Amino acid sequence: MLFGLAVLFAAGSFIASGLLAPRNPTNAKRAAYECGIVPTKETPERFPVKFFLVAMIFIVFDIEIIFFYPYALAYGSLGVFGLVMIMVFTFAVFESFVYLISNGALEWGPLKQVARPSGAVSPERTAESTIRRVGLENRPIAEETAA
């Protein structure tokens, strides 16, 4: 009976909303609201894959911490065997983290091409290549004005 009452209330709420809602939609009301900032791009934009990669890395380490909880509870009764097993587990997860860092999984920003003395070009991250100076695009840099 309580479930039926909940379904009846939900259906009644939807029907009342459809009947009583004002019907004067405009383009401004249909547009996506971005915290008062005028939208500069179309709304459906894809997120870079790096966001999902960082989320998956977070989940892996979060689960590792969850596995530490039962070990902490049974620490006294496990002895040396438990310590060795948790160290092996921690090493395996830490090794995967080192692998991710060595492959550049957590690297952000554009790469700046820097010429080496041998003439080869290699990507290097610098403050000039990764920091966007907002509002300074058409202004001279301080070093140029001093010269």
Image: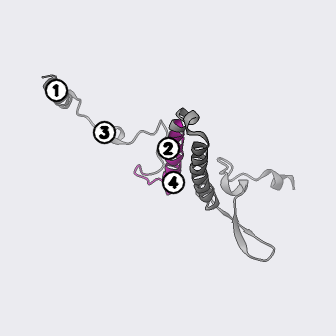
Q: Read off the magenta span.
A: 42-69
Apparent side of residue 143 relative to residue 139 in the rendered image (left or right): right
- How crowded pointer 4 is (Cα within 10 Å; few <14, some 14-19, many 20+) is rated as some
Tell me how far mark 2 sits from mark 1, CA to CA: 36 Å
Q: Amino acid at mark 1?
A: Phe
Pointer 3 or 2: first along the chain: 3
Nearer-N-terminus badge (3/4): 3
User: Residue 144: which quarter of the image?
Assistant: bottom right
Give the Cα distance between marks 3 and 2. 47 Å
* Residue at numbered disc 2: 63
Front-most of residues 143 and 2:
2
Camera-side residue: 43 or 74? 74
Mark in the foreground, 2 or 1: 2
Secondary structure beneath disc 3?
A: loop
Which tag, 4 or 2, sits closer to the chain's start?
Answer: 4
Q: Which mark is residue 81?
A: none
Q: Position of residue 28 (x, y in %)?
A: 36, 39
Mark yes or no: residue 109 visible. Answer: no
Q: Which residue is mark 1?
A: 3
Q: CA distance from mark 3 to mark 1?
A: 38 Å
Q: What residue is rendered at 58% in x and 54% in y?
A: 92
Where is residue 19 drawn, in percent x and y?
16, 29
Residue 60 left/right relative to 131: left
Nearer the camera: disc 3 or disc 4: 4
Residue 114: percent from the left, percent from the top? 73, 67
- Name which residue type carries label 4: Leu
Q: Which residue is mark 3?
A: 26
Residue 89, image x and y in percent?
Answer: 56, 50
